[in-house]
Image: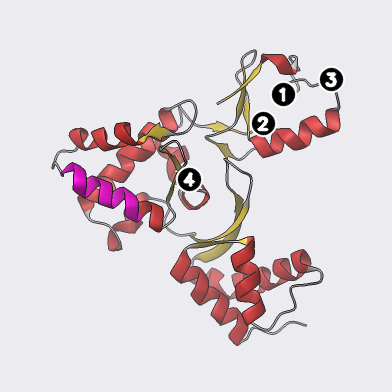
Amino acid sequence: MEVFGDGHRLFIQSMMSRGMMNISEVKEVISECGLDVETEFKDKVVKFVRLINQHIGPINLEIRKGLEEENGQPYYILANTAETSISRLSSTYSPNELELFKKLIESIVENEDGKIGSLAAMNLTDKLEKKIGKEEAENFFNRLEDDRWIRKNTNGKISLSVRSIVELDQYIKDVYPDYVKFCSLCTKLCLQGRGCENCGAKFHIRCSNVFFNKQGSNKTCPEPNCRAPWGQVVIH
């Protein structure tokens, strides 16, 4: 039976300092914990994380696994299970910065493709009651990216990272119920993905790729009540 020890504590410390880790980072840290990562890695990580969650659950923390919407890459995120509101980030960001973050989330969620341009993000400062300069806003967005709350792609588009989607999942559902959609395949929150023009269903690119690979050449919408030809489905 696996015993909670220094290796597990080291992993928790790494999660707290980084917020989230990709598979390569997880392998690196777990290897430093003295665990063999060359064989049965997936099963070992599941058991390793499960034991940690048993110990940090009473203090309202949980390590969760999520997938980056844009590329489907898996990440492990340290989530607070007690506070779902964005206001819990007040120890890290100022009230005005949090207000700007809320405006950013709102714009991203309400945008059909789940991302907005850098210029549009900067213009959100005009909607704040207490104005901040463009340079200050740009520095704040860079901090959000460094803290892994948002992503910026090569085209300058800003989207919510897997950390935001996992940790702020309930906040997004509660505040924007008229805009959020859920992947028809995995049933989780879906901001970026493929949408069916026929029925309006939306699903993650990774989830749909797995589904269509099983379908073969006759690709249709994954929604059971639709099944429109794949040619009618567009990427958002």
Which residue lies under the disc numbered 3?
Answer: 218
Along the line of sight, the residue nearer the viewer: 99 or 72: 72
The residue at 20%/46% (across/down) is 135
Kindly identify the amino acid type of the residue bearing the numbered disc 4: Gln
Which residue lies under the disc numbered 2?
Answer: 184
Mark 2 crowdedness (10 Å alpha carbons): few <14, some 14-19, many ≥20 = many
Magenta stretch in the rendered image: 133-143
Q: Residue 100, how many percent across, how many down?
A: 27, 43
Earlier-in-chain disc, 2 versus 1 = 2
Give the spatial CA distance, label 4 vs label 3.
Answer: 36 Å
**Image height of 65 relative to 231, above or below:** below
Q: Residue 80, how many percent across, how many down?
A: 47, 61
Give the spatial CA distance, label 2 vs label 3.
Answer: 19 Å
Which residue lies under the disc numbered 4?
Answer: 170
Q: Quadrant of residue 116?
A: top left
Q: Secondary structure at mark 1?
A: loop
Mark 1 crowdedness (10 Å alpha carbons): few <14, some 14-19, many ≥20 = some
Q: Residue furthest front?
A: 154
Which residue lies under the disc numbered 1?
Answer: 223
